Image (tube, coloured by chain):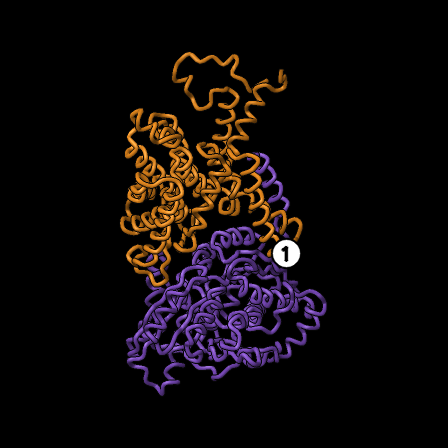
Amino acid sequence: MKKTLITAAVAAMVATGPALADLTIVDTSYRTGPYAANGIPFSDGYQDYFTLLNERDGGIGGEKINIVECETGYNTEKGVECYEATKGEGALVYQPLSTGITYQLIPKATADGIPLHTMGYGRTSAKNGAVFKYVFNYPANYWDGASLAVSHILEQNGGDISGKKIALVYHNSAYGKEPIRTLEELSKKHGFELSLLPVDHPGQEQKSQWLQIRREKPDNVLMWGWGVMNQVAIQEAVNIRFPMENFIGIWWSGSENDVKAAGDKANGYKALTFHNLGSDYPVYADIQQYVVDAGKAAGAGDQVGTVLYNRGMYAAMLASEAIKTAQEIHGVSDITSQQMRDGMEALEMTEAKMEAIGLPNFGPEFKVSCENHGGNGFGAVSQWDAAAGEFKLITEYYQSDQDVIQPLVEEDSAAFASENGIEPGC
Amino acid sequence: MFYREAGDFKTSYVDDNQTFPIKFDRYRYYVVLFAAFAIVPFIINDYWVNAVFLPFLIYAIAAIGLNILTGYCGQVSLGTGGFMAVGAYACYKLMTGFPEVSIFIHIILSGGITAAVCVVFGLPSLRIKGFYLAVATLAAQFFLVWLFNKVSWFYNYSASGQINAPERTIFGIAVTGAQTAPWAAYLFCLIFTFASAIIARNLTRGMTGRKWMAIRDMDIAAEIIGVNPLKAKLSAFAASGFFVGIAGALFFAVYLGAVEVGEVFGITKSFLVLFMIIIGGLGSIFGSFAGAAFLVLLPVLLKNVLVGTLGWPTDLAAHLEFMIVGALIVIFLIAEPHGLAQLWRVAKEKLRLWPFPH
């Protein structure tokens, strides 16, 4: 039995040898498991944008894009398997969409010379490109998110939140723990009281956390949730009649799938975002024409225009712009992952560029450099309008408190560098 | 024809008691060992190591550990994931606390620490049995995961709560960290798996193993014939914890490199290892290997066939994988409750008679 299995495995794996491709983009998605509700729209957006480029422009710089999808189920072991299985195919960049898998891949990808783009997640101190040469987390990171949320609360309270109570409901993992350090610094700075409420994976069980919130009556609740945890938390908040406008989620806790389950009562729930929402952009007409109507949409094709679809598309757009930049720098169209890294490090997003793509005013302007792999930390607050069934921006884009975040980034990246014997340098 | 005892004369008791009494079996075993140690390391690449061999070798050690406790001593445990976490965190603390000591020693020490923890959680087994013991070990599982999340000393106060394996070398060759060559990681784990299997095999066929089996078959009768249940049960917990701890340490240090306790060592891990020994065969060292191979290789194989060869959507393939593996577990439990090891035994019986069954 064992032997036949091994022989069969050998046969199958030999059969799936590396496909010789042009520009290979690996989409490590998760369409199954407790995080699928959020993983599907992101992956659809990510793939559809590349499909659009293939169908409309014939790829990037004349090179077709080959999308390889690999299901991780938000599981680190499967993530490693996906990485090892696909890296040989000449993958240009990985977008793991999981902080756990990111931590896993940072040393591996650095050793293999393949860049990681952890957009708005992953290891925050990777912003320091002098230490994390192959990791990019532009345009914003968790610590920016924590600061943006606190700034919003400050603004709501006329600039003074001393003595207020803020509770953080977080996924009890590297992802959820990431903002704690920044929030602690901010609580010292602004004088608010921080209480921490961890929720264990996968997050279906939150009764005790919300009972505690009901008892302690914090003025604001922040949430670092993902997948099924978001829906449950919002439902629980509705159940204890927590005022929704005081409940702010990170950008990963602000998609339609998360609030719809709670119905009209979720009206007023706020979430951060680092890009614009809705489908009122010229590029959507092209996606409709070249991808959806042509029957080439990824997944069921029903996610177009949702928050996370936009985010996936935004990630793909940033990747394709980095590919273009790399092609310009090196003067070749069929770039390698090393050249892709150079392109990412030289990436500059301007309003004119975004308008040319068909996404005017979609995301912040930023310029990546060796010292700064993380953008400038601009974001905005969106609010759920249950009647209209969509998130709406309620603030302008504003910047996070860089005075607090920059020293933390320096400190954490220096610790990583000394732990791993990395000589920081540009 | 080739597979038979006849003609293979044993002249000493040692020969008579060897693990592979049949000549053909013995040579097959040497060939497998030779291939594993001398051929595979030269042809192995990153994908094979990280997707197939490392998980197989490490799960095999964990399955051996659980098999000693559940298969040989009859104490059902659902705490394997938690005990693997003890091994992983012990290894992490030792690696970062004493960087000058060899990683080889750290991993063995992690096994020892896990054995001690396992004995503590095994104490209730003297009073409670069967399902009730399973629930007690389940409590250990949740307690340990909670502990490693809650007490930041265990992860050196890092902001993310993750533990990361720093680079460690043996004779100047990296075996942990990102620079590890595939063959080095493979050989390092193979040595542990090989040694574990040899030790476990010899433990289980000696006096200790017989005591465990006596307790498993009927504890009151065993006590009457002079087996001390305290010593027998706790030694089973200790031996089991030792192997499971080594598996946990290797899982963290060599295989994954970075670990988050709730996700990697959760309750699903406990069930996975339990399924391995049930499918492989309770009370069999070979069964531990067969079960680990089955549950590690099958999903990878299915994924490669469904997505890679047939080009199906990944979500459909992932769901089908669950269904196929689940169905196979059920079919196995009905058709062959003694697992793959029993199939192997039957096959050997048939082989002895082949090709003249009369």
SS type, badge 1: loop
Nearer to us in this view, A84 or B341: B341
Which of these two is toward me, B39 or B159?
B159
Q: Quadrant of residue B132?
A: top left
Q: Position of residue B114 (x, y in %)?
A: 32, 44
Q: Quadrant of the N terminus of chain B?
A: top right
Any part of residue A21 in sight: yes
Give the residue drawn at x 46%, y 77%. A270
Q: Position of residue A261 (x, y in %)?
A: 53, 70
Query: Which of the 4 image quarters holds residue B188?
Result: top left
In the rendered view, would you say B138 is above or below A358?
Answer: above
Please tell me how crowded label 1 is: few (under 14), some (14-19), or many (20+) other residues with Cα within 10 Å.
some
Judging from the image, what is the letter of the chain drawn in purple?
A
Up/down of B339 relative to A120, above or below: above
Answer yes or no: is residue A130 visible. Answer: no
Residue at the image point whose x is 56% and y is 43% from the top: B298
Amino acid type indicated by mark 1: Pro
- Quarter of the image with the C terminus of chain B is top right
Q: Is residue B335 left or right of residue B253?
A: right
Q: Is residue B200 left or right of residue B328?
A: left
Look at 32% across and 40% down and name the residue there.
B125
Measured as percent of width and height from the top left, residue B246 is found at 37, 42
Judging by the rendered image, the residue that carries numbered circle 1 is B313
Query: Percent x, y for residue A10?
Result: 59, 40
For the colour orange, the matching chain is B
Residue furthest toward the right?
A294
Could you tell me how many numbered marks the image carries? 1
Name the subunit of mark 1. Answer: B
